[in-house]
Image (cartoon, rainbow, N blue to C red):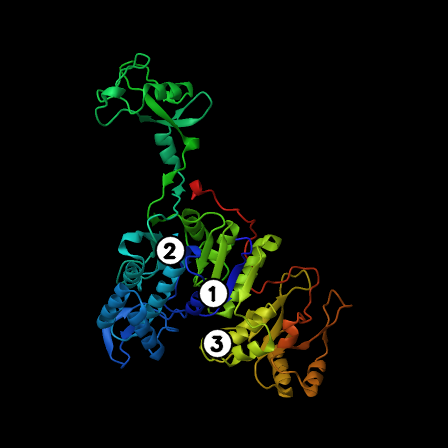
């Protein structure tokens, strides 16, 4: 499609799938749906009535709760969804009751229906999950995509040790369910490199050109009277050869035949190491470690997956130019790898924090080589910004703050759900000397009415946090007294650049930011401390070859 533009959507993926993504338009889907996003463990299966059960699950305590929205979603699937899915969901409710797990599965069932709709007949879907709900999710996928289209349950060994082995075996792996939509799906086998031991043992011969090779027999496993012939004095196996006399001559001319010293031996076929792709990859993936704390690609996102993992999936189940969709894209690993490998992409996430992180990641990774893309669903004017601030769904207040912090390239100050923010919504880091220590602009975001005392409070926060500068971002225009209070803070003058002056306290309105007027923060020719950890720079199509995966 010549007019295609990659898309990054903010919002509920169910709504976006239904409104924005056409039928049979996606070649590959990868999703890593959170059970919830807050990583609070050991949540009991609990009935809506408050009655607990003896079963205990590892889950997250954030989004999925059985409420009126869950009931509506359940009834929608049962009345309008595929028959098998409707029957399955009713059976699950009978078994599980009305609890958080059932709410999660109901919401996932809705999305499964839409993902099946948008997937091309030649497409595939990979669902990444842990044992918390994997068994239930596989049943949902069986009901939506069909048992016959199940291809693999892949086990990704993400770590080699864990500290949870006191009362059970350590949990070291995740599940990835691989389904196709129909039988004629795209698939390209992947390979892992041979070990040095395998090479030394199997490819032990070296020809006159220094090429390593092994040999393979070319005798027929079944009687082939028409292929029973002598060749250069060598007798065939009683069953005969697997190839014709003409083919034998052709391989001989190409130097592909191994002739034993004794005429009583059997001719064999040479298999050169440098022509082998490696060991065909199975469904046990233990060669891609989890991202370590000091890994270059680590961005600080709690559920970030290794690029090598997504690279393997995208290379196996898509071609260049295909459309890759990640409806729970988080920090955007699938999107970044799709961009690098020359695929088109659609990413969806429900948090502005993730959208800001993905934008930074794409910019840092690809620079001027980044394909054009649209960001859809974020405020484009003050009216939509105000609507976001007032929205209660999805923690609308905090989503507004995260969106604003993204506008000024600031790092969020803390987890809002863990208590008061102490006046710190975000930080902008910068350097103005060669000490290697970043200076700080403290950022405060206000969506409601603001007065002069807000600036006074910001000054106090700056002093407490030892921040060099402060920035107030507001929906409302600042009053004269506010401007006077900010001006009274004077200027920040970098020690090594005494001719540069920056207002210590600045006020920026959403209207100004949307028009491109950013805060006056030191940009002194030195590398600024990044808001998010910088992604490693890559060129597009700089993937590993399929044979080396």
Question: Which residue does the image show at 57% across and 69% down from the upper left?
Answer: 406
CA gap between label 1 and label 3 equals: 31 Å
Kindly report which numbered mark, 2 or 3, lies closer to the viewer in this rendering: 2
Indicate the secondary structure of the residue bearing disc 1: helix
Q: Which mark is residue 283?
A: none
Q: Which residue in the structure is indicated by mark 2? A: 125
Please state if 6 lies on the left or on the right of 548 as rendered: right
Q: Which residue lies furthest to the right in this view?
A: 499
Indicate the secondary structure of the residue bearing disc 3: helix
Q: Which mark is residue 20?
A: 1
Residue 128: x %, y % from top left: 37, 58
Q: How crowded is mark 3: few (under 14 residues within 10 Å), some or many (20 or more)?
A: few
Q: Which residue in the structure is indicated by mark 3? A: 416
Residue 117: x %, y % from top left: 38, 61
Instruction: Give the vertical position of 266 relative to 384 (above or below).
Output: above
Q: Residue furthest top?
A: 233
The earlier-in-sequence mark between 2 and 3 is: 2
CA gap between label 2 and label 3 equals: 34 Å
Residue 172: x %, y % from top left: 34, 56
Indicate the secondary structure of the residue bearing disc 2: strand
Kindly report which numbered mark, 1 or 3, lies closer to the viewer in this rendering: 1
CA gap between label 2 and label 1 equals: 19 Å
Q: Nearer the viewer, residue 75 or 448?
A: 75
Q: Which of 208 and 514 is in front in this view?
A: 514
The earlier-in-sequence mark between 2 and 1 is: 1
Question: Which residue does the image show at 37% across and 65% down from the upper left?
Answer: 111
| Quadrant assignment for the C terminus | top left
Q: Residues within 10 Å of mark 2 (few under 14, many from 20)?
A: many
Does the rendering let one see residue 469? no
């Amino acid at each position: 499609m010549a007019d295609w533009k990659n898309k990054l959507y903010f919002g509920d993926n169910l709504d976006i799938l239904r409104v924005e993504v056409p039928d049979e338009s996606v070649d590959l889907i990868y999703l890593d749906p959170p059970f919830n996003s807050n990583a609070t463990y050991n949540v009991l299966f609990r009935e809506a009535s408050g009655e607990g059960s003896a079963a205990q699950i590892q889950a997250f305590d954030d989004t999925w709760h059985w409420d009126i929205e869950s009931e509506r979603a359940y009834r929608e699937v049962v009345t309008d969804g595929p028959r098998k899915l409707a029957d399955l969901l009713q059976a699950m409710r009978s078994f599980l009751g009305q609890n958080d797990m059932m709410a999660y599965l109901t919401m996932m069932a809705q999305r499964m229906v839409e993902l099946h709709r948008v997937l091309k007949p030649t497409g595939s879907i990979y669902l990444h999950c842990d044992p918390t709900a994997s068994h239930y999710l596989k049943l949902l996928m069986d009901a939506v995509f069909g048992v016959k289209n199940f291809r693999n349950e892949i086990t990704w060994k993400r770590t080699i040790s864990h500290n949870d082995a006191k009362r059970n075996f350590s949990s070291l792996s995740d599940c990835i369910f691989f389904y196709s939509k129909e039988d004629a799906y795209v698939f390209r086998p992947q390979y892992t490199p041979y070990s040095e031991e395998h090479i030394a043992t199997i490819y032990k011969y070296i020809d006159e050109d220094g090429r390593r090779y092994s040999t393979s027999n070319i005798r027929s496993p079944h009687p082939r009277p028409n292929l029973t012939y002598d060749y250069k004095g060598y007798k065939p196996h009683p069953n005969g050869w697997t190839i014709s006399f003409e083919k034998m001559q052709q391989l001989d001319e190409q130097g592909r035949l191994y002739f034993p010293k004794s005429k009583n031996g059997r001719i064999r076929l040479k298999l050169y190491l440098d022509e082998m792709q490696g060991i065909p990859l199975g469904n046990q993936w233990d060669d891609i470690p989890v991202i370590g704390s000091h890994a270059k690609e680590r961005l600080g996102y709690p559920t970030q997956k290794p690029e090598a993992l997504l690279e393997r999936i995208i290379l196996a189940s898509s071609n260049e130019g295909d459309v890759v969709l990640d409806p729970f894209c988080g920090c955007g690993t699938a999107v970044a790898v799709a961009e690098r490998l020359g695929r088109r992409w659609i990413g969806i996430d429900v948090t502005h924090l993730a959208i800001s992180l993905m934008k930074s990641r794409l910019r840092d990774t690809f620079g001027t080589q980044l394909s054009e893309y649209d960001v859809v669903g974020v405020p484009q004017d003050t009216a939509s910004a105000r609507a976001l601030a007032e929205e209660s769904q999805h923690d609308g207040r905090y989503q507004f703050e995260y969106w604003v912090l993204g506008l000024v390239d600031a790092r969020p100050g803390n987890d809002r759900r863990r208590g008061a923010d102490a006046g710190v919504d975000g930080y902008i880091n910068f350097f103005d000397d060669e000490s290697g220590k970043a200076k700080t602009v403290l950022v405060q975001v206000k969506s409601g009415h603001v007065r002069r005392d807000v600036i006074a409070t910001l000054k106090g926060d700056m002093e407490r946090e030892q921040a060099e500068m402060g920035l107030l971002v507001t929906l409302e225009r600042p009053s004269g007294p506010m401007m006077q209070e900010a001006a009274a803070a004077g200027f920040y003058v970098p020690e090594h650049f005494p001719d540069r002056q920056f207002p210590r306290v600045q006020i920026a309105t959403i209207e100004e930011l949307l028009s491109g007027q950013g805060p006056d923060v030191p940009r002194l020719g030195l590398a600024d401390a990044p808001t998010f950890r910088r992604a490693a720079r890559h060129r597009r199509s700089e993937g590993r070859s399929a044979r080396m995966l």
